[in-house]
Image: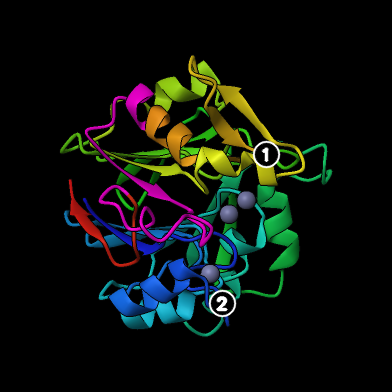
Amino acid sequence: MEVTLLGTGDTTGTPTPRCDCDTCLRARELGVERSRFSVHVHNERTDESLLVDASPDFRSQFLTQDVPLPDAIVISHIHFDHLDGLGNAYRLLEDVPVFAADETDPQTGQSVAGTVSEKYHYLDSISVEPRSPFEPFEACGFEVTLVPVEHPPLLCYGLAIEDPETGAKLSLTGDSNYGIGEDSRDVLRSPDLCFVDGIVPAKHVEYHPLGGDHPDEAGVHRTFGTKHMTIEGARAMADDLDAGEYRLVHLSHYIPADEAFDDDMAVDGERFRL
Ligand SMILES: [Zn+2]
Ligand SMILES: [Zn+2]
Ligand SMILES: [Zn+2]
């Protein structure tokens, strides 16, 4: 399994357009980028590629990174930064299954799969394949399991991606706060590599109108607002999931410049072989 991080940023990315904050300046100096979220997983046995989420930066990601176009796609949830790149399939991809959860979201009255079908009904090159959480399915020779995570108000799913031949395992929390349930954690647990949502340091909760949540014993908030983990929370999650290796993803430009490029904080183009 060869895993390439195509997009490691939050919804505005780093650098954020026209932003001259220290973190965006440092990213430009270092020549690194955090575009909108997407992960490319290549199966070297079958020579197939699975794409996790369709970033609005799809085109530039596939121009910049040396990876094949996807043979299948999984969509974690319907936020812009994870779904709106799917239109790039037009005249570029052929016969690509798009897997997404089949549970109805009370917020939208539709499942993720239903929203994808409705929004991209004009795309003949894709077929939407609804799948039930906790029920493993096959994609690109991998065994993939969607698990519910916590990203209110919308339903969102983390993923475990395993190679049944080699035993290699990649887990992704998806966009989530720290309150992921034990049944979902159990599926994500003990991966060789884990990508964990961490958006800002815990000290930033004072700037969020809803503050933070899920404090640890020292009172440090592991959730920022309601939708994402803090950097501290994401590291605690990687520890709880017993990840062999991990990277924090979905990072924002609000992380101070002297912390924002620490070793466990992903940048676009990082590649792993499991
Ligand atoms: Zn900035
Ligand atoms: Zn989201
Ligand atoms: Zn997101």
Q: Is mark 1 within 8 Å of ligand 2?
A: no
Q: Residue 151's x, y, as percent?
A: 65, 39
Q: Amino acid at mark 2?
A: Cys
Extent of the magenta region: 238-264
187 shown above or below 91: above
Q: Quadrant of residue 136?
A: top left
How far is disc 2 from disc 1 in space, using C-alphas? 23 Å
The quadrant holding residue 232 is top left
Residue at the spot x=69%, y=68% of the render? 120
Dot 1: what SS?
loop
Q: Is residue 57 above or below residue 71?
A: below
Locate residue 237, reporting x and y percent: 42, 29
**Residue at 52% from the left image edge and 85% from the top image edge:** 91
Residue for badge 2: 19
Give residue 154's position: percent from left, percent from top.
72, 42
Confirm whether residue 229 shows in the render: no
The answer to which of 77 and 260 lies nearer the viewer is 260
Nearest the camera: 74 or 204? 204
Tell me which colouring the rendered structure shows.
rainbow
Q: Helix, strand, or loop for circle 2?
A: loop
Q: Is residue 64 left or right of residue 18?
A: left
Q: Is residue 127 visible?
A: yes
Amino acid residing under circle 1: Gly
Residue tagged by mark 1? 225
Q: Which numbered disc, 2 or 1, marks the residue closer to the eye?
A: 2
Mark 2 vs ligand 1: CB under 8 Å? Answer: yes
